[in-house]
Image (cartoon, rainbow, N blue to C red):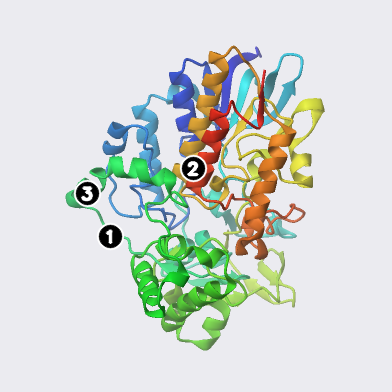
Amino acid sequence: MATRTLDALVIGAGVAGLYQLHMLREQGLDVRAYDTASGVGGTWYWNRYPGAKFDSEAYIYQYLFDEDLYKGWSWSRRFPGQAEIEHWLNYVADSLDLRRDIQFDTTIERAVFDEDTNRWTVTTDLGETIDTQFLITCCGMLSAPMADLFDEQSDFAGDIWHTARWPKEQVDLAGKRVGVIGNGATGIQVIQTIADEVGDLKVFIRTPQYALPMKNPSYGPGEVQWYKSRFDELQQNLPTTFTGFEYDFTDAWADLTPEQRQTRLEDCYEDGSLKLWLASFAEIFSDEQVSEEVSEFVRQKMRARLQDPELCELLIPSDYGFGTHRVPLESNYLEVYHRDNVTPVAVKNNPIARIVREGIVLADGTLHELDVIIMATGFDAGTGALTRIDIRGRGGRSLKEDWFTDIRTTMGLMVHGYPNMLTTAVPLAPSAALCNMTTCLQQQTEWIDEAIRHLRANGKSVIEATKEGQDAWVAHHDELADENLISKTSSWYVGSNVPGKPRRVLSYVGGVGAYREATLEAAAAGYKGFALS
């Protein structure tokens, strides 16, 4: 099979990959995107489990580089479901005529940097070899599922589905005994959706979550016109806020009276969005007293709905602060546990020991017989998508081995020792967690596009993160992270859900606007922190 030669190879055809492909093609590069999936969408192709939907408002989870593209699509509601989101990304691919440069059903297995040619040799699972100058990873932050977690899992006689690999065909759960492992944002969406369909539902709960009620109104012509008329405002505002959402932190906790604080909390809560987390008080991330007061506010809301003391004990967090884990939005999730066919199973102190033919066995020997097991067990966030590819940089160094020792990047855009490999949605950038993903992914893909334009305009062919530049960014990142309560809480935000993963806050916590300024300043200073040759 002949080797294919490219200027740039993009891994992934989701939100970042589609835009990156479009921009690089616009500047005249011979570029091609590859994706394991059979269609575009990335996260929104794979995560088609029952109840999958946005928890960012649809009108901000969009590309903002083209007003016609933005206004050419109309959302049906504030937080639409997976099918509509996948349809939107297909609209984008068709509008920009991207499919002719995307190869689906193809997995990138290996990428090796050749120090003699300063190019990457990439191989696929189909036996293809691609020679490319630039390797650009748009693999997604949550795209490497934690699926094979339990002993004897393959012995189960029924069906096991991970939410991130849900089949396209209809899964019949009617009347069946179903177990859901995990109650994070994804698990909550599944549980609240299937409870009235299944015969018996057992939810295996290790860590309770602070959950906020979602208000998800339908959009008619008036609402659609309202948000489309705000295009210029959103284009200017979203890249500068703390988390890339339209709302932001305003008043300091200390500047308000107790009554004013309560009013702010109630207003944010009633918004039915992530506003309480991302625009109430920034001090929830740094001040333990403020964190506790806001956490107790949310606990009281949850207690009022649950009422049952045993359910409150099991489902309401008490040992970590609101917002230091990913905050889920829900629709009558708590009320699900009042149903006769739903049983919560506590597994923090009595963990799942193994999966057998009949179902799930706990450490104390209890067997829960099941027909279907749904694994909402999360991801190897930030790093997993790339460490599952055999990526070799200078001197044959392995990215998997490097990141197993210490997770380091330069602004989440490059890794020292891997020239011409430019990255999105990897650690040490906001896109690793604390960001409206389209905001951050657009920032990163646009920076990458401009960096390549700069190289070409100046007769250069290689860009590489310097060790000094990377060390400086890691030190800056860690200084901010160490002051943040997220760093003191065990969650996938710090990699604690993956055995052996080095502990580090994966997401840059300095804010989306501040991150954007830092990356633009580095570029304006001749790509400070990077070596060009």
Q: Earlier in the sequence, mark 2 or mark 3?
A: 3
Measuring 69% from the left and 41% from the top, which residue is drawn there? 472
- Label 3 secondary element: helix
Mark 2 in CB contact with mark 3 (< 8 angstroms): no
Measuring 40% from the left and 42% from the top, which residue is drawn there? 86
Residue matched to label 2: 440
Q: Residue furthest front?
A: 255
What's the amino acid at mark 3? Answer: Trp
Q: Residue furthest left?
A: 222
Q: Earlier in the sequence, mark 1 or mark 3?
A: 1
What's the amino acid at mark 1? Answer: Pro
Residue matched to label 1: 217
Q: Is residue 410 above or below residue 28?
A: below
Direction from residue 67 to residue 460 in the image, left or right: right
Measuring 45% from the left and 74% from the top, which residue is drawn there? 334
The answer to whether residue 180 of the structure is visible from this angle is yes
Viewer-closest of 322 and 509: 509
Spatial CA distance of label 2 from label 1 is 26 Å
Residue matched to label 3: 226
What's the amino acid at mark 2? Answer: Cys
Quarter of the picture containing the C terminus is: top right
Q: Is residue 271 above or below residue 145?
A: below
The answer to whether residue 147 of the structure is visible from this angle is no
Mark 2 in CB contact with mark 1 (< 8 angstroms): no
Q: Is residue 280 above or below residue 507?
A: below
Label 1 crowding class (10 Å Cα cut-off): few <14, some 14-19, many 20+?
A: few
Pinpoint residue 305: horizontal percent, then vertical percent.
41, 80
Q: Quadrant of residue 182?
A: bottom right
Q: Closer to the camera: disc 1 or disc 3?
A: 3
Pinpoint residue 236: horizontal percent, then vertical percent.
35, 41
Viewer-closest of 114 and 183: 114
Direction from residue 413 to residue 399 in the image, left or right: right
